Amino acid sequence: MSEITAEQVAHLANLARIDLSPEEITRLTAELGQIVDSVAKVAEVATPEVPATSHPMPLTNVFRADVVVPSLSVEEALSGSTDRDGDKFRVPAILDEE
Amino acid sequence: MKKAELMDYDKALELFEPVLGFEVHVELNTKTKMFCGCANEFGQGANTNTCPTCLGLPGGLPQVNAKAIESSIRLGLALGCEIAEYSRFARKNYFYPDTAKNFQTSQYDEPIAFNGQLTIELESGRQVTIDIERAHMEDDAGKLTHVGGATGRIQGADYSLVDYNRGGVPLVEIVTQMIEGGEADSPEIGRTYVAAIREIVKALGVSNARMEEGNVRCDANVSLRPRGSGKLGTRTETKNVNSLRSVERAVRYEIQRQAALLAAGGTITQETRHWHEDTGITSAGRPKSDADDYRYFPEPDLVPVAPSRAWVEELRATLPEPPAARRKRLQADWGFANLEFQDVVNSDLLDAVEATVAAGASAQSSRKWWTGEVARLANVAGVSADSLVEPVQLAALIELVTAGTLTDRLARQVLEGVIAGEGTPLEVVEIRGLAVVSDDGPLIEAIDLALASQPDVLAKIRDGKVQAAGAVIGAVMKAMRGQADAARVRELVLERAGTAE
């Protein structure tokens, strides 16, 4: 069994801005532990000859030419926002007073 | 804002050894953003250059800008870096309103360029070699405006506004190794290093390199180590240092602030600090904490960048002469004294003088005209000197002076005509009828007239009082409305005074 703790799950949830109930934390602690164990099994099989990979496709250097394509209109861009001020997105205060 | 205690700078250096580090962000001047085809340009109104990819909307997929990769590799090479054979993008996860995707697409353990070196020269002539740890690619954040509150700053604002036009613009972040041994020169090292980076990206043409527009931005890390201690102090990272002068001031300020705090038995908090250009102080931002647990992971939507060695060598061949080497070469070629050369460099007229010399003018005349009359007129007009007149036009003007067609005074009038769009220097000379009268006939006529009307002066000249000739020369120059060569007039005056009876 891996060493994932409830504290780690709560910390991760906080970083990811996910609100978890104590029950969810308990359940996810167990589930994440199993996932980490499963990955560890794979790591046992991977020998030094098998390089780490981040992508299933054996592709590199997929580039786009530096050519401008039309953007969204301002109205389209702002259409999903809950609040706006003129052509800008409006967001709540970020920091408290010093 | 509470003003921090500062220790006298010399005293601070007696007690502590400053250790520096810099992160310089360079905004590339590609036509489009890093991962989408939105225009990389500003000034068209807020949120005009956005799309699902740079707004982080569902379904948006990034596509790497080939030109940005090319620019990053060239910049890496210019900084003496090795270029990675295999490089990847990673997500740096954090929540902040200027980052619509909730992550910045950056590079983590496999940057495009690493292990570089840049040698800078301080005003004293001291050379300092800065080790570059890495130069990696990433995308820029949007622009926040804070509304309400007493100061218009983020602290105490009622709310903030976001413009995502800058979100997704390609950046290269250049990270130095720790810089030790800077001592009292530390602030100047900061300024000179950032100036050198700016000069390099400008010479490469990969960035507009205007600090006032945020094309080059610096974060300065400063920590103090007590003398005789092997242990590094806690560092602060000062952000938002966006002019060369501010880099120097911010480093100096942090040295003095940290020294006062440490000497009073306090401790330094490892934190981000904000530089305030207006008041010249730094203030605490958020402390480094959980928020810096960025949970980097490889960007699943992008495949690795693996530049072939052939491509890298091809790009290496496109590098311009390093700016520092170019300055040394030009100063030697032109035979300028240090002050003369500095004058040209500080006025940002190196390219202009070089082009004028290339067009056939002498180096000294080119320097004199650019830093003198052209700079003066530019200053009056509130524009940069090199935007006022073409080097080839100025070279043509200088040639007219050298050939004796124009005096300096006439040449200044011709220059004004050229700037006013009246034509080439030669055309202006013809249109305004400004050439020096080089035919001796009209000069002799005027001289004889002046001598005849001033018989006392004539007598003095004949008595050998040559300086008396000044009055006649003045009268002749006036009669010729300045369009005569004073030296030639003087010669002729003495000649006529000797022979005229």
Image (cartoon, grey):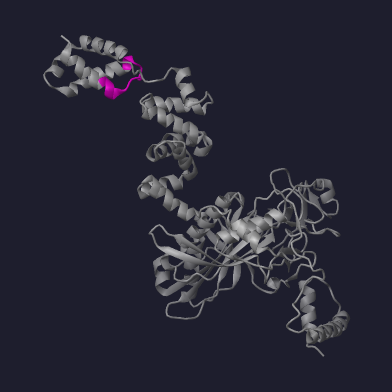
Q: Quadrant of residue B176?
A: bottom right
Residue B380 location (% of width, % of height): 48, 34
Q: Quadrant of residue A59?
A: bottom right
Query: Which residue is located at x 82 percent, y 68 percent?
Result: A57
Residue B208 location (% of width, % of height): 60, 49
Position of residue B277 relative to residue B494, above or below, is: below
**Is B383 on the left or on the right of B98, as rendered?**
left
Question: Quick one: quadrant of the C terminus of chain B?
Answer: top left
Q: Is residue B240 visible?
A: no
Task: Farthest residue to the bottom: give it.
Answer: A1
Q: Nearer the viewer, residue B264 or B21?
A: B21
Residue B120 location (% of width, % of height): 46, 60
Position of residue B116 relative to residue B459, above or below, is: below
Task: Farthest residue to the left: give it.
Answer: B463
Position of residue A7 relative to residue B181, above or below, is: below
Magenta range: B478-489
- Residue B498 on the magenta segment: no
Position of residue B231 relative to residue B112, above or below, is: below
Query: Which residue is located at x 28 percent, y 10 percent?
Result: B445
Q: In this figure, what is the number of numbered marks?
A: 0
Q: Nearer the viewer, residue B311 or B200?
A: B311
Question: Quick one: quadrant of the N terminus of chain B?
Answer: bottom right
Query: Which residue is located at x 46 percent, y 18 percent?
Result: B430
Q: Nearer the viewer, residue B198 or B315?
A: B315
Residue B199 location (% of width, % of height): 53, 53
Q: Is residue B105 visible?
A: yes
